[in-house]
Image (tube, rainbow, N blue to C red):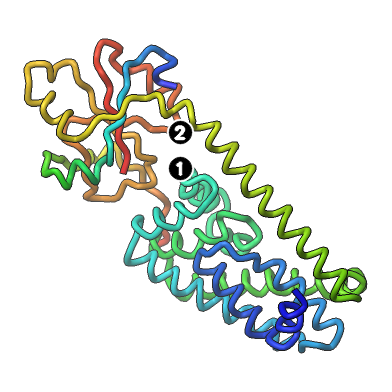
Amino acid sequence: MNDLLSMMARHGYALTFCVLLAEAIGLPFPSAIALVVAGAAVASHTLVGPTVLLTGMTALLLGDISQFWLGRYAGWALLGFLCRLSMNPETCILRSAESFYKRGKTTLLIAKFIPGINTMAAPLAGSMKMPFGQFLRLDFTGAFLYCLTYLLVGYGSRDFLANLLSGFHAAGRALEGVVIVALVVYAVYHIAQAVKYRKYDVVPRVQVQELAARLASADAINVQIADVRSHGYYDRGAERIRGSIRIEPNNLEEEIKSLPKDKDIYLYCT
Amino acid sequence: MLREKGFNTFVIVGGLTAWRKAGEPLESVPKDDLVKLPTFS
């Protein structure tokens, strides 16, 4: 642990850059914590404030610009991939899109402060055909606000962090505790998710060939195929299984009113 | 939830990807089912 802390002191700019770039491209890295630590390092004259600010903004802008252009050309394929990394893949795109609905372009100014939307805002802006110049202006301002805010938080809490880091041994133990707590929370979350979704395992699963054979038989009239992809995955020219109907998973209560109860319903997603 | 409401449901293993790989028939998503997101252009 001591090695890690001394490495942070030696490579503060590089670490800040790498952590912020990683989060900007969708990886689960704590950029806010990196900026707070960097802010405290500025307060203790280990790092230079304007340089850290410039480093952080450069990393965020590089990540966001690449995501913007990927979103422009890869569309929903990229957004779907990024959403798989999120806590709630089904509502990930919708939540980000709703933010654009509600707040319009200013979403880009605050997106970095909102978990989930921070990763999606740039590629979503790209897929929505936002002019690049406009995106750059808004994203630049958003990156500036984000970096400055957390650097100031770190700068202002330098005494607290200094006390925390006054002894490497104590800091090491504290960090070990944080890591253990984080691992426990992670494990509990996944166990809770497994328990929550265990009941869905009772739904029988059928192979494509089995269903295709049934559709080719006289029994086909008793079959209804339903597409339950979240509508964020739809794109112009998208395809679905022939003869299937759409069930919007986020509006299931209403959707089931029109479902036939006398047929076997075969559900599918991507 | 569908099963709780009395629907006899099944899940297609592999979803649309498996269906497509098996060479089974597809159709374009109807325009009415497309939900348009805001655009800035």
Q: Residue at x 76, y 83 (%)?
A: A6
Chain identifier of the residue bearing label 1 in the image: A
The C terminus of chain A appears in which quarter of the rendering? Answer: top left
> Which one is in front in this view, the residue at disc 1 or the one at disc 2?
1
Residue A174 position, x and y percent, is 82, 63
Q: Does residue A107 sit above or below A18 in this rendering?
A: above
Q: Does residue A184 sit above or below A32 in this rendering?
A: above
Look at label 2 and name its amino acid. Answer: Asn
Residue A175 position, x and y percent, is 77, 65
Look at label 1 and name its amino acid. Answer: Glu
Dividing the picture into quarters, in which one does residue A75 lie? Answer: bottom left
Give the residue at mark 1. Answer: A90
Task: Work out whether residue A112 or residue A210 is closer to the camera in this orientation and state it.
Answer: A210
Around disc 1, counting alpha carbons within 10 Å, would you say few (fewer than 14), some (14 to 19), or many (20 or more)?
some
Q: Residue A159 carries which label?
A: none
Give the residue at mark 2. Answer: A250
The N terminus of chain A appears in which quarter of the rendering? Answer: bottom right
Q: Say which label, 1 or 2, has the lower sequence index.
A: 1
Q: Is mark 2 on a helix, strand or loop?
A: helix
Contact, CB < 8 Å: mark 1 with mark 2?
Answer: yes
Horizontal side of residue A72 vs A239, given as left or right: right
Around disc 2, counting alpha carbons within 10 Å, would you say few (fewer than 14), some (14 to 19), or many (20 or more)?
some
